[in-house]
Amino acid sequence: MPNPRIASAGRQARQDCEKSQFMESKNFSALHVGANEFSDIQQSNTDRLVEHLELLRAEQIRANDQMQLLVQRLLQVPVLAAADLPKLLQPEGSVAASAPKKARQKSPLPLVVQISQKTKDVQTDEGFQKNEHAQADEGGSKQNVTTLETCAPKLRRKSVSAMDLQPLEITKHHMLSWGVGYSGKKKLLQYNFNQLQAFGALPAAFAECSIFRLRRTLTFQVLLQPFLILAVFGLLRATSWESPEDARVMLQPVIHVPSELRQLVAFLLGLFISLQLKRWWSIRSVFLQGYFFSTAQLSLFLGCVMPNQSEELRQRMERYFLTAHRIIYLCARGETHLLRRLEGDGLLTADEISHLKTRIAALPGGAQKPVGGADMDLAEVPLMWIAQLIFRLYACSNAKQMDIKLAIPPPLMLKMVALCMDARRSIQDIEMMLTSPVPFSYVHIVCLLVQFYVMFACVASGIQLGTDTEAPSAAAVVTEIIMISAQNALYLALLCLTTVLDNPFTDEVIDFPAMHLQSRLWKSQIFARALLYDEDVVDAEIAKFCARKDRHKKEEEEEEDDDNMMNDEDGDE
C-alpha cells in the first residue's frame, strides 16, 4: 500500500512544476509583447525624429532666405549706412547691445529710421517690399522715430497676412474715455455712469458727445428762437391796439397751439427714439457681434485643425475677416473708392486689389457700381475667399494626385464654411438695416410736428409778453426766452439724436469706434489660437495617457489571471 505522504508530496511537486511552467510561458509571452511594443515605439520615435529634422532643415533654409532678404531690404534704406549693418545684426548679448542706454541714445543719425505709425512696412509674398502707395488717413498719422533694432522684427514678417496691430491710445478725461477713428476724429469709448448720475450731468452737457452738440444745426436753431420771440414781442408792442386784453383774446388760439401739440409730440418723438435705439442696438449686439463671434469661432477651428506648417494660410484667412470688417465701414459711408487704403493698412495686397478691380471691370455694367447708399456686396468678397480656401483645402487633401497632408473631416469643413456664411448673413443684415430705414412718412410727420411745436412755442411766448397789460421788465423777458429756448432745445436735440443713431458706421463722436473694434476683433483671433498648446506637446500627452491606460489594463488582466489561477488551485484541492 503506497504511503499517503509520498503521494501527496508527489502531487504537490507536480502542481508546482505545472505552475512554474505556466508562469514561465506567461513571462515569456509578456516579454515578447514588451519587445514588440518597444520596437514599435522606437520606430515611431525614429520617424518622428526624422520628421523633426526635416522641419528644422526647412526652417533653417527659410531663415537663411529671410536673412538675405532682410539684408537686401536694409541696404535699400537711404538713411542707413552699409558700414553699420554688422552693428545692427549683432545679438542682444553682444557688446553693442549691452552698451549703456545713454551711449546708445547718442548713436549717429544713420541708425534712425523715420517710419509712420499707420503706414507700416508691408511685405508681399515675393519679398519684403515697402508699400509706397499707402495713404494716410483723413486725420493724418503721427510720425514716430524708432531705432532699427526695434523696427527689424516688424520687417521680418513673412507676409502681409501676419497682422500686428499696435495698442491704440485711449484718453481718459473725467468721466469719459476717448479713442480715435480712422479719420482722426474722436470717438467715445466708455463713460462713468456713477459720476454722470451724481454730479456730472450738467458739466457733461458741454462735452462733445452731449446730445446738444451732435449737430451744428442745433446751435443755429436754438439761437434763432430768441430773435423770433423778440420779433413777435416788438411787433405787438409797436402795433396800436385798443387794449392788450383784446389782442390776447384775438390771438388766444395761437397761444393754445403749443399746449395742444405738446402731448402728441412727446408721444411720437418718444416712440421714434425708442425705435431708433432698438435698431441701433440690434446692429451692434446682434449683427456686428454675430460677425465677431463667427470670426473668433473660425479662428479657433483653424488653430485646432490646421498644422503649424500652414500658419501663413491660416493668418491669411484671419486677415480676410479683418478686411471684411474694415470694408463694412467704407460701404456704409459710401467710400468704396478708398479701397486702396487697405493696402497701406496691411489688409489687402496689391495683387488682391488688382484682382478685385479686374474682376469687377469684367462684370455687367449694372453690377460694377454700388446700388443704394450702403451696398455691402464688396464686404462679402473676403468671406467668400475664406470659404473657397477652406473647401479647396478639403478637396485637395482628399485628392490622390495632391501631396497635401491635411485631413479635414467633412462635418468640420461644413462647420467652418457655415461660420463664413453666418458672417456673410450678418453683413447682409447690416445692409438691410442701413438701406431700409424707417418709412419716410412717419419720419416726416415726427420732424414736422417737432418743428411746428418749436415755432408755435416761440410765437406764443412772444404773444404773451407783447399782450401783457403792463410792459414786462427785461428780467421777465430774458427768463421767458431762456425757459422756452431750453424746452425747445431739448426736443430738437432728441430729434438730432435719432439722426445720429440712423447710421452708426459714420464719423460721429458716438458712432461705433471702428479702429478699436478692429483691434478687438484681431485680439479675439489671436486669443482663439495663439494660446493653444503646441501640437507636439499635446500629442506627447495623449501618447503618455494611452500608454498609461494600456499599462493599467495589462496589470488588471494579470491580476485577474492570477486570481483565476488561485481559484483553480483552490478548487483542485
Image (cartoon, helix red, strand yellow):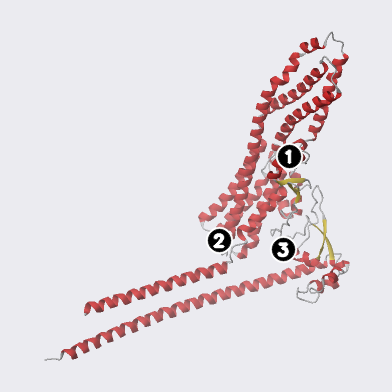
* Disc on the earlier residue, 3 or 2: 3
Residue designated by label 2: 397
Which of pointers 1 and 2 indicates the residue nearer the eye? 1
Label 1 to label 2, Cα distance in Å?
Answer: 62 Å
Relative to 274, residue 236 above or below? above
Which of pointers 3 and 2 indicates the residue nearer the eye? 3
Query: Picture coordinates of residue 106 (x, y %)?
Result: 87, 69
The disc label shown at residue 201, or none: 1
Disc 3 residue type (three-letter) = Arg
Relative to 375, residue 105 above or below? below
For residue 362, say whether it is visible: no
Label 3 to label 1, Cα distance in Å?
Answer: 48 Å
Determine whether, in the image, residue 103 is placed left or right of residue 155. right
Are the residues flagged by discs 3 and 2 in contact, CB closer than 8 Å? no
Image point (43%, 74%), residue name: 551
Q: Residue 319 is drawn in which quadrant?
A: bottom right
Quadrant location of the N terminus in the rendered image: bottom left
Does dot 3 land on a helix, a strand or a loop?
loop
Nearer to the camera, 497 or 288: 497
Query: Picture coordinates of residue 481 (x, y %)?
Result: 81, 26
Q: Tell me the crowding category of disc 2: few under 14, some 14 to 19, or many 20 or more residues within 10 angstroms, Cα based.
A: some
Image point (50%, 70%), residue name: 543
Which of pointers 3 and 1 indicates the residue nearer the eye? 1
* Disc on the earlier residue, 1 or 2: 1
Residue designated by label 3: 157
Disc 2 residue type (three-letter) = Ser
Nearer to the camera, 545 or 385: 545
Determine whether, in the image, residue 401 is placed left or right of residue 237. left
The disc label shown at residue 517, or none: none
Quadrant location of the C terminus in the rendered image: bottom left
